[in-house]
Image (cartoon, grey):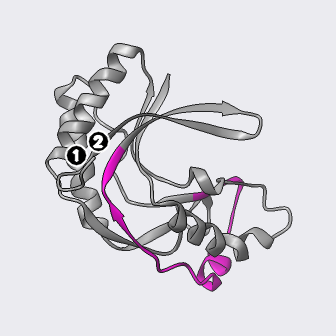
Amino acid sequence: MRLFVAVYPPPEMQAAAWRAVDPLRTGRGDSVSWVRQENLHYTMRFLGELDDAAAARATDAMREAAAAHARFGATLGGFGAFPTAKKARVLWIGMLHGAESMRLLAESLEQALRKQRFERADQPFEPHLTVGRVRMPGDWTTRLIDAPGVEARFQVDRLVLMKSALGAGGSRYERIAEAALAGSGG
């Protein structure tokens, strides 16, 4: 199974982010694979191909990390790109508020995964909501600056272990397990 740990904003925040991306989707010939609204999420940690035993260890690590953190508020923000706007490969929406709490949660998840014998993450975590993948790198500076972004608040209250299946219509995701943050209930 191809797995990752994520934070999913609630559907109304996914919809707000989706609407905010509209001005970026108007360019012709951009060769961008836009993320479907229901797939918008924060990848806390990509795990790769795992068997059932490793998935169970990942679930244990996710639950340990979630239990160590209270739920917190977050606010979506402006647009950005990786590696840079001039050589964009990934288009994303950042966080106005809650980024530090998200980084601390990701750090706890990383430590818990290391205890469960997972390799260290390839890249340091930086909270961003991927909205599109640019197939042909290009300069998105002007469009990203001109796009209004979105200021929408939501509660981060759980981590979710997701299975990803790549298909012709894009990625299909399936929830494997959830772990509520402390004080979140359920």
Range of the magenta residues?
A: 131-159
Q: Position of residue 64 (x, y in %)?
A: 18, 38
Camera-side residue of 11 and 30: 11
Q: Residue at x 45, y 69 (%)?
A: 94
Camera-side residue of 83 and 8: 8
Residue 138 in the magenta stretch? The answer is yes
Q: Residues within 10 Å of mark 1 (few under 14, many from 20)?
A: many
Q: How many marks?
A: 2
Please indicate, yes or no, whether residue 124 appears anywhere in the rendered image: no
Q: Position of residue 127 (x, y in %)?
A: 38, 60
Image position of 126 (left or right of 30):
left
Q: Are marks 1 and 2 in contact (CB under 8 Å)?
A: yes
Q: Residue at x 24, y 60 (%)?
A: 71
Q: Position of residue 132 (x, y in %)?
A: 64, 57
Which label belongs to residue 179?
A: 2
Identify the element where label 2 is drawn: strand
